[in-house]
């Protein structure tokens, strides 16, 4: 039997609509997944980053970042005698030891606050040093590694939190 043009049109329209509905269901499932992540992350805005996130984060930073030769020069606050203009140029000093101490004391109220302070490590060197200065490039590398560790640990925390709440 030959399919009429109208029947073919109806069949194709039905297929297109089925695909649209499937895509809408996928999008809704993704929105639900993101809402669940927001619910998991919501307490971080109110109190402090959860201990079950900060503990492995501290361990990972100590094991993977601090031993790097590049991290050595960023481990402690910049000595004023090394950079006399530092305090006048840099609005928010930041170093790895300060970052770790604040994590230990649960200073950070949100991931965005933690990420911003990690960003200061590189931003401060970018303000202070010429573009091709090795320490400036090192600070960018350490910042990027720290941000990757934070993202990785947060993803692990969210997946363990959502699986334990299921």
Image: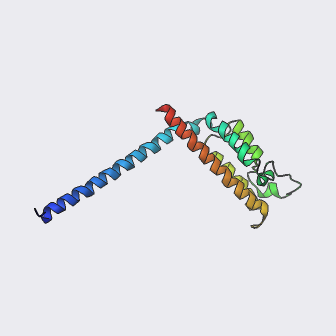
Q: Is residue 37 above or below residue 141?
A: above
How many numbered dots are placed on residues in this image? Answer: 0
Which colouring convention does the figure follow? rainbow
Q: Position of residue 127 (x, y in %)?
A: 74, 61
Q: Residue at x 78, y 63 (%)?
A: 134
Query: Residue reaching furthest front?
Result: 1
Furthest residue toward left: 1
Q: Quadrant of residue 4?
A: bottom left
Q: Quadrant of the N terminus?
A: bottom left
Residue at 14 percent across and 65 percent down: it is 5
- The image shows residue 115 at horizontal and vertical percentages of 64, 49
Please tell me which residue lies in front, 152 or 32.
152
Direction from residue 120 to residue 159 in the image, left or right: left
Q: Residue at x 76, y 67 (%)?
A: 132
Measured as percent of width and height from the top left, residue 3 is found at 13, 63
Which residue extends farthest top?
Answer: 165
Residue placed most toward the observer, 135 or 8: 8
Q: 16 left or right of 85?
A: left
* Depth order, front residue of 119/160: 160
Residue shown at the point (81%, 56%) measured from the top left: 86
Q: Is residue 148 above or below residue 136?
A: above
**Image location (x, y in percent) of residue 101:** 74, 40
Mark yes or no: residue 140 visible: yes
Residue 41, visible in the rendered structure: no
Position of residue 46 relative to residue 76, above or below, is above
């Amino acid at each position: 039997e030959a399919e009429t043009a109208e029947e073919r049109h109806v069949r194709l329209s039905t297929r297109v609509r089925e695909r649209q509905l499937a895509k809408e269901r996928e999008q809704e499932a993704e929105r639900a997944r993101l809402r669940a992540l927001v619910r998991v992350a919501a307490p971080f805005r109110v109190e402090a980053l959860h201990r079950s996130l900060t503990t492995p984060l501290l361990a990972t930073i100590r094991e993977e970042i601090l031993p790097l030769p590049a991290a050595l020069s960023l481990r402690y606050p910049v000595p004023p005698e090394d950079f006399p203009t530092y305090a006048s140029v840099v609005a928010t000093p930041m170093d790895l030891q300060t970052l770790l101490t604040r994590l230990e004391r649960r200073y950070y109220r949100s991931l965005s606050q933690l990420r911003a302070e990690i960003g200061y490590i590189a931003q401060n060197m970018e303000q202070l040093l010429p573009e091709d200065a090795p320490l400036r490039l090192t600070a960018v590398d350490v910042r990027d590694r720290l941000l990757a560790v934070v993202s990785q640990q947060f993803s692990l925390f969210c997946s363990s939190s959502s699986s334990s709440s299921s």
